Image (cartoon, grey):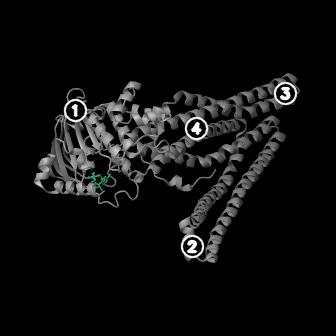
């Protein structure tokens, strides 16, 4: 198969080859088996003509029947051994290749899932998935073909040539002198074919684009309103014509390649017969040697032909490996310090302290691989826009701190800093007096529980979604958590109860119900700190009441940071922070803030009025 020449011109980062070695070494025994099988195959390929020579010169010519029988049998035996070796070759190279895919995929998956949230908000999922699919498979295919084909090509070539030289160096040299006549046109035609193939792909793509643009609803409408069908058809005919011309040329050149190869093979064979025949008549060459030489010669061209593809195969493998390694090289912005300590999860709930926190979202190129980033990410936003400015506050242990303020004020961003979904640009977030960056990720996850506004449920059973937080939870634990989150009645009424499949393509909980499932999930984890973004989706009165009751259980005795959209929720919060423009504008209790006037009192009055009219 001819592959795009541009592949061989790609730049490979230095060190790529060295990095492949450990992956290959993991499969050293299968690799050794592969080498052995390939060796056996190559030896048999080169040895067969020698046996043929013995059969003719030592058996048939002198008329020795036992030699004829014995050598014929050994040719048959070797054929069987060779079949086994070729089978082993295919099997083992498949195993090594797939093992490599497995290694690369699992390593890359593990690495990518540890990337900070900022990475996922910016990366194009498509390109990321393609790295883990297409490139990994590209690496595997190239490696498999390299291992089985190139290895055997090189070995066969060496052994066949050595045998030929051993039998008759004169004929071998004469035959080799023909090789350039074969290689030069082959290379020229190959280049031309590659150009044609690339051009064909381009033309095909353009034709396809034109069809899909004209045939989707919006495009079809535009064409109907403005287009002139005759001109459209003429343009399409032009494109289709170019596709046709390129295809014809590709066919002709492809055929020419085959013809040149067969003509040259025939010419070389004739040459060997001619020169060898002369030597045989002169008595310096035995008949068997001549036959063996011709047989060997025919086995030479296959490998030589494959050598021309080898460079492309090697480069394809390297490019694919390089692209996968690029993903593995992503530096996580948020990493655990080597000397990180576990947070004290047991004992009384710790307090949370924001100390001079400033923050802006990472800009373009700051989260790792620019080639994986969505082209629009960061374009619509000014990257350096400060989102939080010098925010300082303390959320007292075991108490409820509420965040209120207009949308876009930075409330969600504040809550993201506690579980280290992001790290602040300046300042320190402390939990129980410890900088969160000094804590191990695992203990931080156990300490901080988050219920977001649009609580996400995996496409799986309710049970699986709940035990995700605590794999060893018993049936009793699950039911108790659901009861406390005021969602058990709903789940119990489902035909399959806890085993109902939910999520995108499953049973759809309403927004309020989903949040209560998320609260049950959080209760199972039972973290001392709770970060909660109240659901804004319009909740019916009953759902709202259920959420309020669930909240009481979830927040009891825990240090909590709650983004409140309905101010009625937080009338008895221990502390209310009014956030605007990334700053703490006001702070106090409900009563204090109401009597102080300002943004909070304003927000409260507006909501009251809304409720009265709505
Ligand atoms: P709130 O929760 O108070 O409505 P947010 O914290 O969600 O506000 O957002 C504060 C600001 O940060 C907004 O201007 C928003 O556009 C911006 N922002 C939020 N998420 C991101 C992100 N992933 N990347 C860049 N900017 C963001």
**Residue at position x 69%, y 45% in the image:** 301
Q: Along the polypeptide, which appears first: circle 2 or circle 3?
A: 3
Instruction: Tell me, yes or no, if residue 614 can be seen here.
Output: yes
Instruction: Tell me, yes or no, if residue 355 can be seen here.
Output: no
Residue lying at the far front of the rendered structure? 612
Q: Tag 2's secondary structure?
A: helix
Give whichever of 89, 405 is nearer the camera.
405
**Residue at position x 56%, y 36% in the image:** 97
- Cα separation, mark 3 vs mark 1, equals 99 Å
Give whichever of 447, 285 is nearer the camera.
447
Q: Which one is in front in this view, the residue at disc 2 or the one at disc 3?
A: 2
Q: Position of residue 147 (x, y in %)?
A: 58, 38
C-beta proximity under 8 Å, tags 1 and 4: no
Q: Position of residue 55 (x, y in %)?
A: 81, 29
Q: Which one is in front in this view, the residue at disc 1 or the one at disc 2?
A: 1
Vertical position of residue 306 compared to residue 387: above or below: above
Q: Quadrant of residue 210?
A: bottom right
Q: Quadrant of the C terminus?
A: bottom left
State the mark number for residue 557.
1
State the mark number for residue 59.
3
Looking at the image, residue 153 sits to the left or right of residue 170; the answer is left
Q: Which one is in front in this view, the residue at disc 4 or the one at disc 3?
A: 4
**Residue at position x 62%, y 52% in the image:** 2
State the mark number for residue 186.
none
- Cα separation, mark 2 vs mark 3, equals 81 Å
Give whichever of 383, 522 is nearer the camera.
522
Whether disc 4's CB lies below 8 Å from ligand 1 is answered no
C-beta proximity under 8 Å, tags 3 and 1: no
- Cα separation, mark 4 vs mark 2, equals 53 Å
List the residue tagged with mark 4: 147
């Amino acid at each position: 198969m001819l592959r795009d020449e541009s592949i061989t011109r790609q730049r490979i980062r230095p060190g790529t080859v060295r990095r492949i070695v450990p992956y290959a070494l993991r499969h050293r025994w299968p690799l050794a088996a592969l080498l052995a099988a390939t060796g056996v195959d190559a030896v048999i390929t080169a040895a067969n003509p020698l046996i043929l020579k013995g059969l003719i010169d030592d058996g048939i010519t002198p008329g020795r029947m036992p030699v004829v029988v014995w050598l014929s049998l050994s040719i048959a035996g070797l054929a069987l051994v060779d079949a086994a070796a070729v089978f082993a070759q295919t099997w083992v190279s498949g195993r090594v290749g797939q093992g490599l895919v497995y290694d690369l995929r699992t390593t890359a998956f593990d690495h990518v899932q540890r990337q900070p949230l900022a990475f996922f908000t910016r990366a194009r999922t498509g390109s990321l998935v393609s790295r883990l699919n297409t490139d990994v498979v590209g690496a595997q295919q190239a490696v498999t073909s390299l291992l089985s084909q190139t290895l055997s090509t090189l070995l066969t070539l060496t052994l066949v040539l050595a045998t030929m030289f051993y039998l008759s160096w004169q004929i071998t040299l004469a035959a080799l002198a023909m090789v350039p006549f074969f290689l030069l046109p082959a290379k020229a035609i190959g280049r031309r074919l590659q150009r044609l193939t690339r051009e064909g792909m381009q033309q095909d793509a353009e034709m396809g684009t034109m069809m899909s643009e004209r045939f989707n609803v919006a495009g079809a409408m535009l064409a109907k309103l403005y287009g002139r069908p005759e001109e459209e058809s003429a343009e399409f005919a032009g494109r289709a014509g170019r596709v046709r011309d390129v295809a014809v040329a590709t066919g002709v050149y492809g055929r020419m390649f085959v013809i040149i190869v067969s003509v040259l093979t025939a010419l070389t064979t004739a040459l060997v017969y001619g020169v060898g025949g002369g030597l045989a008549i002169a008595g310096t060459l035995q008949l068997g040697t001549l036959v063996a030489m011709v047989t060997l010669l025919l086995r030479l061209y296959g490998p030589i032909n494959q050598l021309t593809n080898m460079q492309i195969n090697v480069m394809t493998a390297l490019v694919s490996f390089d692209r996968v390694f690029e993903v593995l090289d992503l530096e996580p912005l948020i990493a655990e310090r080597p000397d990180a300590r576990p947070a004290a999860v047991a004992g009384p709930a710790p307090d949370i302290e924001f100390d001079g926190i400033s923050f802006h979202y990472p800009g373009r190129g700051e989260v790792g691989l620019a080639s994986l980033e969505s082209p629009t990410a960061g374009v619509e936003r000014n990257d350096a826009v400060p989102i939080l400015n010098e925010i300082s506050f303390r959320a007292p242990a075991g108490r409820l701190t509420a965040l209120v303020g207009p949308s876009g004020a930075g409330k969600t961003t504040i809550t993201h800093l506690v579980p280290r979904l992001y790290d602040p640009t300046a300042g320190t977030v402390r939990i129980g007096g410890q900088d969160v960056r000094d804590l191990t990720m695992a203990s931080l996850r156990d300490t901080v529980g988050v219920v977001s506004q649009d609580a996400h449920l995996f496409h799986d059973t309710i049970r699986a979604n709940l035990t995700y937080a605590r794999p060893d939870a018993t049936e009793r634990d699950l039911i108790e958590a659901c009861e406390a989150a005021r969602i058990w009645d709903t789940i119990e009424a489902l035909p399959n109860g806890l085993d109902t499949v939910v999520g995108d393509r499953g049973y759809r909980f309403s927004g309020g119900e989903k949040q209560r499932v998320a609260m049950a999930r959080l209760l199972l984890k039972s973290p001392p700190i709770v970060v909660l973004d109240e659901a804004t989706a319009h909740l019916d009165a009953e759902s709202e009441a259920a959420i309020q009751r669930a909240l009481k259980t979830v927040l009891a005795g825990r240090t909590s940071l709650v983004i409140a959209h309905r101010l009625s929720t937080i009338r008895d919060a221990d502390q209310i922070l009014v956030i605007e423009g990334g700053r703490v504008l006001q702070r106090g209790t409900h009563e204090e803030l109401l009597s102080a006037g300002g943004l909070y009192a304003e927000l409260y009055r507006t909501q009251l009025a809304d409720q009265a009219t709505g």
